[in-house]
Image (cartoon, grey):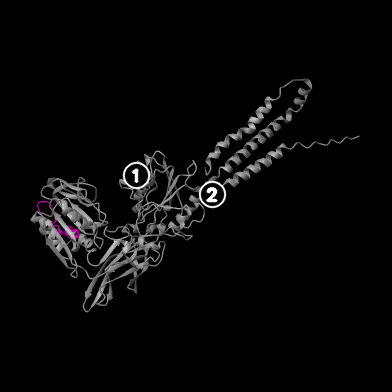
Amino acid sequence: MTFLQPMLLFGLPLVALPVIIHLINQRRYQTVRWAAMMFLLAANRMSRGYARLRQWLIMALRMAAIAGLTFAVSRPLAGGWLGVTAGGRPDTTIVLFDRSPSMQQAGAAGGSKLETGRRQLVQTLEMLGSSRWIVIESGTNRPQEVESAQALMHSPAIEPAAVTSDIAAMLQAAHDYIKSNKSGRTEVWICSDLRENDWNAESGRWQTVREAFLEFPQGVRFHLLAYPQKAPGNLSVRVTDVRWKKSGDAAELLVSLRLTREGGEDVKATVPVQFEIDGARSEINVEMAGPQFELKGHRIPLEKSHQRGYGKVSIPADGNPADNDSWFVFDQPATRQTVIVAEDPQAAQPLELAAGIAPDPSLQSAVAPVGPSELGTVEWEKVALLLWQAPLPGGETASAIRAFIERGGQAVFFPPRTAGDAEFLGMRWTTWVESKQDVAVENWRGDHDLLAHTQSGTALPVGQLQVRRSCGLSGESTALATLRGGAPLLARGTTNAGGAYFCATTPAPADSSLASNGVVLYAMIQRALDGGALVLGSTRRMVAGELPPAEDPKRWKRLAGDDDAVTAEYAFHAGVYASGDRLLSVNRSPAEDSARVLADGRVAGLFRGLDFARVDDQAGNLSSLIQEIWRLFLIGMMVALVVEAALCLPKTARTVRATA
C-alpha cells in the first residue's frame, strides 16, 4: 500500500497519545493505604480482570481511531498497480508507449492492448499528478511535452501504427531528456506487450542505458505496465514477393505470400485469402495445417496494358487486426544490375556467373566488372548489387557506396589478398588464416537472410562447404554463419537501410568450395539481388519506420491505407503512397509476425539495480489499476469510536428486591 500524501504519515506517532494521557493520569494521584479501601479492593478482586481488559480495549480503540484518521488524510492507494513511490509528486513524468502492431491485439472484453494501456495510465497518472508530462512514442523516439495526463487520450502520437518499437532507444531518449533538462525526481512509465523484437534484450545498448540511469543522483523510478498475453490462433498474412509478367497477349501478376498462425500448430483450418488490385477483388481458400503456410506465385490475370499498380492481400478479422492486411506495389521488372570489383580473377569469375544467371527467364540481369578507378562512372541508382573483392573502400568511393547501401542497395564484401588497415561501416579485415585441413561450417542462420531455407523448406547445403583459407573480421556485426571454432564466415554489418555483408573467404578454389559447391553461392547472390532490386524502378517496398534518409514522407500522397494517419506519420502506417512518379508500399516489419514474449526473468535483468516495479494487465480491462481507499480507514475510525464509546458506558445498577 502506498500514499498520495506520504508526508502526513509523520503524524502516526500521535497514535501514542492515549497511552501518554493514561500514564500522566496515573502519576497525578498518590496511593494511600487505609483499611476500608483495602477491604473494598479485596472484595472487587474477582471482577478486576474484566475491568483491566476493558481498559486495554478502550485504549486500543482510541489509538486505532487516531491511526485511521492519519491514514485517511494520507490518501492511501491499493490495487494491482506498481507500488507507486513515496515522496510526493514527481517533478517529471515520462511515458513510453509501445504502439507496434502487436499492441493492437484485442482482449476478450474488447479493446486493444494499446487502448487499455492508454486508458489505465491516464487514470493512474491523473491521480498521482506531476509537474511536467513527457511522452515518447515508438515511431520517432522523440520526447514530446503534453499539457496533462488527460491529453494523452487524444494525442495522435499514441495512435496505433505499423512501426516496430525499440524500447532501448526510447529509454535512451528518456535519459537524454532528463540529462539535458536537469529534471528533478523523475518517474518513467512503460506500456508494452513485451515482444522480443521490440525489446531486443540481447543488444549491448541495454547495459549502456542501465548504467547511464544509475549515474543520476536524483534517482529515477521505472514502472512497467505489461500486456504479455498471446492470442492463440491469431493469423497474420505477409506478401513476400510480387512480380509482373508478360503472358502472351496479356499479363499476369505472380503473388507469393506467407500465413503465420500463433499457437495451434496441429490445427487444420481453411483460410479465405482475398486479393485486391486497384479495386478489383478475388478470393481463394487455402488449407493450413501447421504454424506457417507458403503460397508461391499465385497467378492473377491482368490486361497487358496494366503494367503498374498496387493492391493488398487480406484475411478475415481475428484477434489482431493489425496483421490481417499486407500491401504491395508492382511494375514491370527493372534490369537487375550487378557491379563487381575484384582483384583476383579466380574469385571474380564465379561471382559473375552467379549474378548473371537469373532464376526466372522473365527477369533481366546485367553484370558489370569494373576497376576501382572506374567507380566514379557507375550510375548507382541503377545498381542492385555490389560484389567487392578488394581492399575495403575509402574516401569518396566509400561515401558513394555508403549512400548506395543507405538507398536500399545490397553489397557483399570478400577479403582482399592482403588484409590491410582499411575500415568500412565499422568493419575491418584482420589476418588470413590457412588450415592444413578443410574447415567446415559449424552454425548458420537458416530462418532468414541470405542463408535461409529454400521455398520448399529445404536447408541450403551450407554444412557441406569447406574453407581452406579465411580472413579474420572485426567490428560490430550479426553472424549469419560461423566456422568450426567460432570464427565468422558470413556476417551482416550494421546499416540503417540496405544490406552490407562480409564473407570471410572468397570463391577462389584455393580459398573455399564456394565455387565448386555453387548452390550456396548462387543462393546468396540471388537473394542479395532480390533485396537490391526492390529499390530499382518506380516502385518501393518499405518497412514502416525504416526509410532511407533521402525519403521525405511529408511529400507523400496516400493512395490507400489508414485514413486517420496524419501526413507526418505516413512512414509509420501501413498502406500505399505516391512520391512523385513512384509507388511506395509500407508494411509492418517481418519480426512482428513472431509472438515470442520476453521472459519475466529477462525483463527483471534489464532493469537490474534500478528502482523498478511491474504489473501485468489484460487488454479490455475496465477496472482501475489503483484506487484510493481512504474511505475504508474513515469507516474503521468511526467503528472504533463507536465501540470505544460503548465500552465507556457505566454499568447498569442491579435492582435488589427485599422479601418479607
Q: Position of residue 240 (x, y in %)?
A: 28, 64
Quadrant placement of the C terminus: top right
Residue 14 placement, left or right of 303: right
In this rendering, which labeled residue sits more in front, label 2 or label 1? 1
Q: Quadrant of residue 43?
A: top right
Kindly identify which residue carries mark 2: 627
Kindly identify which residue carries mark 1: 209
| Residue range corresponding to the magenta coloring | 509-524
Q: Position of residue 96 (x, y in %)?
A: 40, 51
Residue in view at x 75 percent, y 36 percent = 650
Residue 512 on the magenta span: yes
Crowd rating for badge 2 (residues with CA inside 10 Å; few <14, some 14–19, many 20+): some
Q: Secondary structure at mark 2?
A: strand
Count the labels in the image: 2
Label 1 near label 2: C-beta < 8 Å? no
Crowd rating for badge 1 (residues with CA inside 10 Å; few <14, some 14–19, many 20+): some
45 or 318: which is nearer to us?
A: 318
User: Which mark sits nearer the N-terminus, 2 or 1?
Assistant: 1
Residue 250 on the magenta span: no
594 or 582: which is nearer to us?
A: 582
Q: Position of residue 367 (x, y in %)?
A: 13, 63
- In this rendering, the answer to whether 236 lies above or below 391 is below
Most extreme residue toward the right, as rendered?
Answer: 660
Q: Position of residue 524 (x, y in %)?
A: 19, 58
